[in-house]
Image: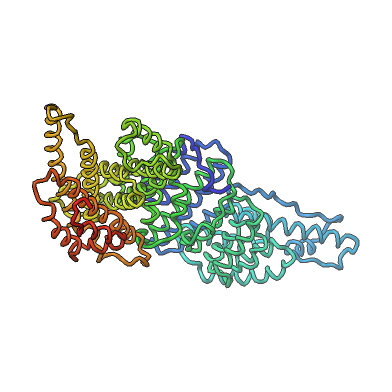
């Protein structure tokens, strides 16, 4: 289970927080202190224990970022703010240790030696060994209490306790250290050199005297500023980092760097809580001022430790916000510089397209902060998957425009995603309706005699149906008007090569009209060529149908029959003139000019398709023109033989490239035979 594998159904309080932080992102006001406040408000109403644990750590992390921001703004190390942030979450009550008693009353000299932690092993051999163990245990517990007073910044309690339990000189040493620490915290002044030299000399001696006690060594090592003496008693990530900043604040003597200390702190987390480990990694990068590592890739953070949907959602939100914060701090232009932070932002944004947490405004806001290509992918997928009516889709498109998304590119991608859909049920139903309405007639390319033709026809109608369903996406942007013709040309070429002329006609009918006075669009010339091709096909089909309907009078007295023949002749002459004119215009038009096309060995599929369409249909149109002349010679006023020179010129002229197409179609011999024949019907 990963962050990307489950989409949460977040609670109302969680949705309120989503909207609140989304408003900050939208206003470019992602201040750590403000985010911490909003998350803390959500924490008060959180009922999921695991989510609450996550939110507590999130609040602390944003507070840490606020500290870092203040430090950078002021130019001060702000040690006290770091130390206060690292204080224990709960009070650590060690308890006051009891000084061990001898079996006999100690002499005044023995008492003095014990107060100074010095022992005479020759005195009273009977109980010296046991008493020594008790005293060493007391010394360790005594300094353990002192250490945790320091750890919790209970400086007044430390002064009172050491006055009661330590020799006066040592009590004064602790008091001087506590007062100086408070002064640094209150006034942000450096350590007084004279005072520091005093306790440095004393602490060095005390460290040597108490090597047997970890806590005693840690206490005097802390006062001395030697981090290596303190780390052995630090059992948590926070305590290690507290020791580092505390010794730094007092101008520590250690050579341990921040990176080395962070590595030690990380080692204390191996058996800790998974949520804390996650946040300690982020907090480590904050302290090390390398939070930009988040942008290096999602593999840097493991996201499989949360098993409830609310915590998963909180984790998505946190990662998205922290990435946006890092980008803002680094001044990174996501439109030009690509990083892996988009993975986190997209992971959070896509949650808002789910029914239970549907908030498209937030999705658009976060998409606007992704890299250009990623924002297109995310918002295009959202629009493609959205199951709503046209008005709702229009609102979502306007939402994208308001958030300055590249809606032209997004709408283009949604169009092509829709084209690739594989559901053909709707297309088949619509095709069946069309077939029923025409009664199965009028479709000259529908082959029902063979299963292969039927399958090809069904697939063609399915593709046309998908194109029709997808087309409105392109029409929602004026900038994509030319894309409409580029996409339709691609589909039409493939349909023409399959001989699906009715499907081509259906595609052309669904396209918008283009005013010739408008600026030329990409693919428009090719589109106009297909329109003329279909006009020629339809006129020729009409002419051929009408030709076969020539009436024949029963006899010389059949007046009604002669009237029908006269009307048919008039109609036939009109249709013949229209068909002849359309075919000549088409053949004289430089449609898909051959000189711009590659050879048959070219790898340019588009150019090769255009070449194949030319070779397939231009010779056919020329043959149709010959047939029109040949079959209507008995009703036309012009001498058909007189048109032969024009036809030869049309075929041979390099201006129209018809000769190359006829030659490629292997139709040259038949065309020449028809033109050279003395018999007009030959």
Please indicate whether residue 388 sits to the left or right of residue 161 in the image. left
For image coordinates 31% across by 60% down, the residue present is: 666
Is residue 455 toward the left or the right of residue 249 in the image?
Answer: left
Do we see residue 238 in this rendering?
A: yes
Q: Residue furthest right?
A: 126
Q: How many marks?
A: 0
232 relative to 590 in the view: left or right: right
122 horizontally vs 648: left or right: right
**Foreground pick, 151 / 636:** 636
Judging depth in this view, the residue of 456 and 73 nearest the camera is 456
Q: Which residue lies most toward the front here?
A: 556
Going by the picture, which residue comes out furthest to the left?
637
Please provide percent x and percent y for residue 517.
12, 50
Percent of width and height locating residue 369: 37, 53
Q: Quadrant of residue 449?
A: top left
Q: Nearer the viewer, residue 648 or 314?
A: 648
- Which colour assignment does the render follow? rainbow
Residue 520, quarter of the rendered image: bottom left
Q: Residue 108: give x, y in percent of width and height.
A: 79, 61
Looking at the image, is 426 positioned above or below residue 477? above
In the rendered image, is residue 404 in sight?
Answer: no
Residue 294 placement (x, y as % from top left): 48, 59
Residue at the spot 36% in from the left edge and 35% down from the top edge: 430
């Amino acid at each position: 289970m990963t962050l990307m594998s489950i989409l949460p159904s977040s609670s109302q309080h969680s949705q309120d927080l989503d909207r609140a932080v989304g408003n900050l992102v939208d206003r470019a006001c992602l201040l750590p202190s403000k985010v911490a406040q909003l998350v803390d408000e959500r924490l008060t109403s959180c009922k999921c224990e695991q989510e609450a644990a996550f939110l507590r750590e999130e609040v602390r992390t944003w507070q840490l970022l606020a500290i870092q921001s203040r430090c950078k703004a002021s130019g001060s190390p702000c040690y006290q703010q770091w130390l206060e942030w690292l204080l224990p979450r709960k009070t650590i009550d060690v308890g006051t240790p009891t000084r061990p008693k001898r079996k006999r009353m100690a002499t005044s000299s023995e008492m003095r030696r014990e107060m100074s932690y010095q022992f005479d092993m020759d005195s009273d051999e009977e109980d010296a060994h046991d008493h020594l163990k008790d005293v060493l245990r007391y010394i360790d517990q005594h300094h353990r209490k002192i250490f945790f007073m320091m750890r919790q910044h209970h400086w007044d309690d430390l002064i009172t306790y050491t006055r009661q339990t330590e020799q006066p000189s040592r009590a004064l040493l602790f008091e001087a250290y506590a007062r100086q620490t408070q002064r640094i915290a209150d006034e942000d002044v450096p350590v007084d050199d004279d005072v520091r030299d005093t306790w440095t000399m004393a602490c060095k001696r005390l460290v040597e005297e108490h090597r047997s006690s970890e806590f005693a060594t840690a206490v005097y090592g802390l006062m001395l500023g030697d981090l290596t003496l303190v780390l052995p008693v630090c059992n948590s990530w926070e305590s290690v980092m507290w020791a580092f900043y505390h010794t730094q604040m007092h101008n520590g003597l250690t050579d341990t760097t921040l990176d080395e200390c962070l590595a030690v702190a990380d080692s204390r987390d191996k058996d800790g809580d998974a949520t804390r480990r996650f946040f300690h990694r982020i907090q480590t990068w904050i302290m090390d001022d390398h939070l930009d590592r988040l942008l290096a890739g999602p593999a840097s953070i493991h996201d499989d430790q949360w098993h409830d949907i609310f915590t998963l959602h909180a984790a998505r939100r946190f990662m998205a916000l922290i990435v946006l914060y890092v980008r803002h701090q680094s001044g990174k232009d996501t439109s030009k510089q690509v990083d892996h932070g988009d993975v986190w932002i997209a992971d959070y944004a896509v949650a808002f397209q789910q029914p239970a947490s549907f908030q498209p405004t937030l999705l658009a806001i976060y998409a606007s902060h992704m890299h250009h290509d990623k924002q297109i992918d995310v918002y295009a997928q959202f629009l493609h998957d959205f199951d709503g009516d046209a008005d709702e889709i229009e609102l979502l498109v306007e939402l994208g425009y308001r958030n300055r998304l590249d809606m032209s590119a997004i709408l283009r991608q949604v169009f092509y995603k829709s084209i690739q859909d594989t559901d053909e049920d709707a297309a088949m139903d619509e095709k069946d309706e069309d077939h029923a309405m025409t009664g199965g007639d009028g479709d000259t390319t529908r082959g029902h005699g063979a299963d292969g033709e039927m399958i090809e026809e069904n697939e063609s109608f399915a593709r046309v149906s998908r194109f029709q369903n997808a087309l409105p996406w392109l029409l929602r942007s004026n900038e994509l008007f030319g894309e409409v013709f580029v996409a339709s040309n691609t589909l039409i070429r493939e349909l023409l090569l399959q001989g699906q002329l009715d499907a081509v006609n259906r595609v052309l009918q669904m396209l918008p009209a283009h005013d010739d006075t408008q600026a030329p669009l990409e693919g428009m010339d090719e589109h106009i060529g297909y329109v003329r091709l279909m006009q020629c096909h339809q006129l020729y089909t009409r002419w051929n149908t009408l030709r076969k309907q020539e009436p024949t009078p029963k006899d010389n007295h059949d007046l009604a029959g002669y009237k029908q023949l006269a009307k048919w002749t008039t109609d036939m002459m009109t249709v013949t003139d229209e068909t002849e004119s359309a075919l000549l215009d088409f053949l004289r038009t430089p449609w898909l000019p051959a000189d711009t096309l590659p050879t048959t060995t070219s790898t340019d599929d588009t150019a090769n398709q255009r070449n194949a369409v030319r070779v397939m249909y231009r010779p056919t149109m020329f043959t149709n023109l010959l047939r029109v002349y040949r079959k209507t010679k008995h009703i036309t006023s012009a001498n058909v033989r007189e048109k032969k020179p024009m036809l030869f010129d049309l075929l041979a002229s390099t201006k129209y490239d018809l000769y190359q197409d006829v030659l490629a179609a292997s139709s040259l011999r038949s065309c020449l035979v028809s033109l050279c024949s003395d018999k007009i019907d030959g």
